[in-house]
Image (cartoon, rainbow, N blue to C red):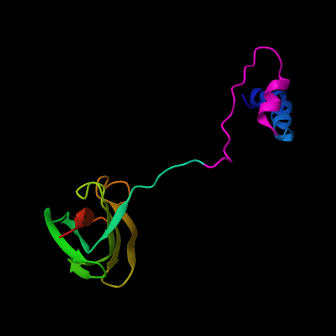
Amino acid sequence: MRLALIALTLALWPLTTGAQQNDDLGTFLQDLGDGVRLEQRPNLNASTSVSAPNVAPADGAILRALDKTLGRPTDIELSNGQAVVFGRIAIRMFECRYPIDNPSSDAFAHVQVLDLEGTELFDGWMVASSPALVALEHPRYDVWVLRCNTS
């Protein structure tokens, strides 16, 4: 079995080195000859016009924290810069932003979670519409953003 793998590797070696020596993949494929059809590659260096959604800062956010051992969720309203202790963790809200066109959707907040000894457990942006996208990973607690506080 090993001998077959070594033979296969040695047989394919010239193909891989040829591809590595050639600066342009398109030229390499054209050099292969008949039966190879190339499509125009997109220009990756060209600037693309992607418009960022218009967002507005909020005064704070409403988070939901879950103590998994008790099975008890708690809604926590925090202003920007405010911190609260929930069980054995401290949750600090830095900033919440929301789309101007639809304040009730896709809010995202910069949240920091520490244990009571000061060890950082999470520091990042949480997205309300996709709580599992960027989540606190803790054996006892879950914390996620519900929405920005726009009132």
**Numbered circles on residues, count:** 0
> For residue 72: magenta?
no
Check the image and report above or below for 104 versus 46. Answer: below
> Residue 131 location in percent, x, y?
30, 56
> Residue 63 location in percent, x, y?
22, 67
Q: Which residue is outermost to the top? A: 35
Residue at the (29%, 78%) spot, across then down: 80
> Residue 122 location in percent, x, y?
38, 70
Residue at the (22%, 76%) spot, across then down: 78
Q: Quadrant of residue 93?
A: bottom left
Q: Quadrant of residue 91?
A: bottom left
> Residue 95 location in percent, x, y?
34, 73
Q: Main secondary structure of the magenta part?
A: loop
> For residue 31: magenta?
yes
Q: Quadrant of the N terminus?
A: top right
Q: Nearer the viewer, residue 38 or 151?
A: 151
Q: Quadrant of the C terminus?
A: bottom left
Q: Nearer the viewer, residue 99 or 25?
A: 99
Left or right: where 47 falls relative to 14:
left
Q: Nearer the viewer, residue 33 or 67?
A: 33
Check the image and report above or below for 98 versus 122. Answer: above
Q: Quadrant of residue 79?
A: bottom left
Left or right: where 69 falls relative to 55:
left
The residue range painted magenta reads 24-47
**Can see residue 136?**
no
Residue at the (83%, 27%) spot, across then down: 11
**Can see residue 116?**
yes
Residue at the (34%, 85%) spot, across then down: 117
Q: Which residue is outermost to the bottom? A: 117
Check the image and report above or below for 52 versus 73. Answer: above
